[in-house]
Image (spheres, rainbow, N blue to C red):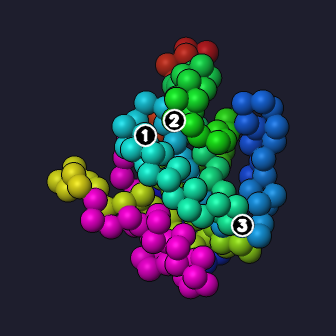
Amino acid sequence: MPVMEINRLAPDFSLPDFSGQTHRLSDYRGRIVIINFWSAECPHAERADREMLAYLKEWRERVVLLTVAANANESVEMIAAAAWTRNLPLVLRGGSQVLDTYAAQTTPHLFVVDVDGILRYQGAFDDVTFRQRTSTRFYLKEAVETLLAGQNPDPAQTSPFGCSIVRYSFDSMLE
């Protein structure tokens, strides 16, 4: 899959939340936006959620988190229950076209968009891998804090790590 180009305008999208309210990426210009391709079942996404929520408290209104439910095989009930349990402020649904546009590969797969709508970081939450179970670098936090300081992240791109995104549900294959 192609990778989104860093330092280019992030493609706009429009997705509903669970109450039916539509959210557009462009609605959040003026703030740093974290787009989080997410899963209710993935332990890597759950670990990232806990840490991201702590970061969001520090960053306050300067940063917004747009969590996009990524797996076609997860029911609305499963997604809603996980979002509620994890205290996620916002989860967007119906993101299959957005998944493809952003070439998201895993949950989590994170994209950081600056205040002008420019993609400045994409990739992993931190440096955890199958071989390295404890993080020593927090790529997402570094990227956002570098942007808050008026500079561009380095690295601007890392390989995402987490659970593979399920693009088709068993039910949709039967139709």
Task: State the CA–CA distance, disc 2 to disc 3.
Answer: 23 Å
Judge whether 9 appears above or below 135 on screen: below
Going by the numbered disc 2, the residue's amino acid type is Arg
Residue found 51% across the figure and 25% down from its top: 73
Q: Is residue 98 magenta?
A: no
Q: Amino acid at mark 3?
A: Arg
Mark 2 / mark 3, whichever is N-terminal: 3
Instruction: Give the magenta-colored segment's residue range.
Output: 135-163
Earlier in the chain: of badge 1 and badge 3, it is 3
The disc label shown at residue 21, or none: none
Of circles 1 and 2, the one toward us is 2
The residue wearing badge 1 is 46
Q: Which residue corresponds to mark 2?
A: 86
> Magenta residues: mostly which secondary structure?
loop
Q: Is residue 23 left or right of residue 160?
A: right
SS at circle 1: helix
Q: Quadrant of residue 80?
A: top right
Asked if residue 161 is among those painted magenta in the image, a careful observer would answer yes
